[in-house]
Image: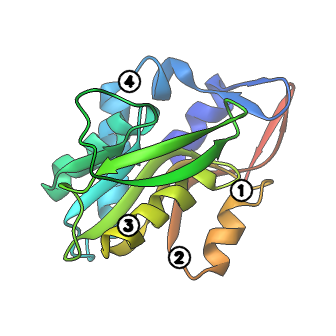
Amino acid sequence: MKLLKDRIKAEAIVVGDGVLKVDHFLNHQLDIAFLQEIGREFYDRFKNEPITKILTVEASGIAIAVATAMLFQVPVVFAKKSASRNLDQDTYTSEVFSFTRNTSYLMKVSRRYLHGQDHVLIIDDFLANGRAVQGLIDIIHQAGASLAGVGIVIEKGFQEGGRRLREQGIKVTSLAIIEAMDEEHIELRD
């Protein structure tokens, strides 16, 4: 997606070891018109799939999932990362290690919102090691639902997540893939 790649080149900041900051337009402050374009791109790439639900992880994936779901006209379900008194006790769960936070957490989705007849599209902001996506796939399998594919805004191609998912035969669509990055340069795949 040229618009996304242009914004990464112009505005993204590399911090420390492997952290790409795009929080001023994607995952802290949200550029709504830009998110609508991202949603449109995911819709165009998956519109031939009979999507019934879009699944993501709180919190950064939610806005992107909503922008996409509006075009599919389907619900968004997001996995919760922390215990909540208003979350059903009857949940699908998967333990996930977070690259960004350098810690493990238990993601949970209420069993009321995913079922065997669902055909699910996973949407998220980043793909690095692929642990969050693997956790979501685990939850989809627990529900007996089917996976349509995975839509990622920015994939870190120099980490193994995308490769491992594709080797499993999963359709992974990344709108921008970073080949390499350091504090002075970001190299994007064409």
State which tag comes first along the sequence, 1 or 3: 3
Residue identified by numbered label 1: 189
Q: Nearer the viewer, mark 1 or mark 2?
A: 2
State which tag comes first along the sequence, 4 or 2: 4
State which tag comes first along the sequence, 1 or 4: 4
Residue identified by numbered label 3: 140
Q: How far apart are marks 1 and 2 (CA)?
A: 20 Å
Q: How many numbered dots are placed on residues in this image?
A: 4
Q: Which of marks 1 and 3 is in front?
A: 3
Q: In this view, does 42 lie above or below 85?
A: below
**Which amino acid lies under the numbered mark 1 shown in the image of this protein?**
Arg
**Which amino acid lies under the numbered mark 2 shown in the image of this protein?**
Ile
Residue identified by numbered label 2: 170
Query: Going 12% across and 54% down the picture, which residue do you hit?
Result: 73
Q: Can residue 181 be spotted in the picture? A: yes
User: How crowded is the residue under tag 3: few (<14 C-alpha within 10 Å), some, or many (20+)?
Assistant: many
Q: Is residue 95 above or below residue 167?
A: above
Check whether the beta carbons of the residues at disc 2 and disc 3 lie within 8 A of each other: no
Residue identified by numbered label 4: 31
User: How crowded is the residue under tag 4: few (<14 C-alpha within 10 Å), some, or many (20+)?
Assistant: few
Q: How far apart are marks 2 and 3 (CA)?
A: 13 Å
Residue 111 percent location from the top left of the image:
24, 57
Residue 45 percent location from the top left of the image:
37, 66
